[in-house]
Image (cartoon, rainbow, N blue to C red):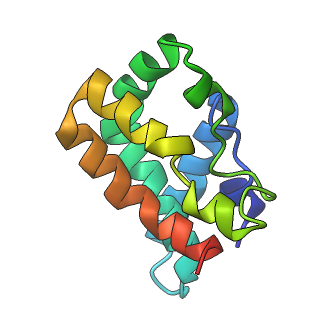
Amino acid sequence: MSNKIKDIDTSDETDINEAVLFCQQQGKNQSAKIPEETRIYCNFINFYIEKFVQCDEKVDAKQSDCVENWDPFSEDSYDTEVECDEFFGPDDCIRWEIAETCGEKAWAAFRDHILPIKALYCE
């Protein structure tokens, strides 16, 4: 899978724009078989850009410890079973931050789009 997707810095607008362009190119390339891992990341990126970025900005503005310490795209985030069990932070704090700030529907949509990424790393 392309590092443009796997290693994006979600706080860096240039990285996000490059990832979006990469995903758009993959979607246009009908003759190539897109790896499932790339499809999963692109699905999440498209959701994030089209439907979640405003919620994310509100959640980030709260500057909670949970949000500041959560990095689901870090390569070393899933080295142990505990880290996989706490994918959404201690006591599922990311869930509560999103639900409290943007509502349960926003949380459910975010969860549904990021769980396939978790499945890539955690059994």
Q: Identify which residue, 44 or 23, lies in the foreground.
A: 44
Q: Residue at x 76, y 60 (%)?
A: 3
Instruction: Tell me the quarter of the image containing the C terminus.
Output: bottom right
Going by the image, does 118 lie left or right of 103?
A: right
> Relative to 46, does residue 38 appear above or below in the rendering?
below
Q: Is residue 64 above or below residue 28?
A: above
Q: Which of the two residues, 57 or 32, is positioned nearer the viewer here?
A: 57
Task: Identify the residue at horizontal 36%, vertical 24% (top origin).
Answer: 54
Q: Which residue is drawn at the image coordinates 44% and 64% (left, top)?
A: 115
Q: In the figure, 1 relative to 47: above or below?
A: below
- Split into 4 quadrants, where in the image is the N terminus? bottom right
In percent of width and height, residue 36 lies at 53, 81
Mark count: 0
Q: In the image, 87: left or right of 75? A: left
Residue 45 vs 25, above or below: the answer is above
Where residue 75 sits, quadrant-wise, is bottom right
Q: Residue 8 or 64: which is nearer the viewer?
A: 64
Q: Position of residue 13 (x, y in %)?
A: 63, 28
- Identity of the residue drawn at 70% across and 39% down: 9
Is residue 51 shown left or right of residue 58? left
Name the spot of residue 100 as percent of width and height, x first: 28, 25
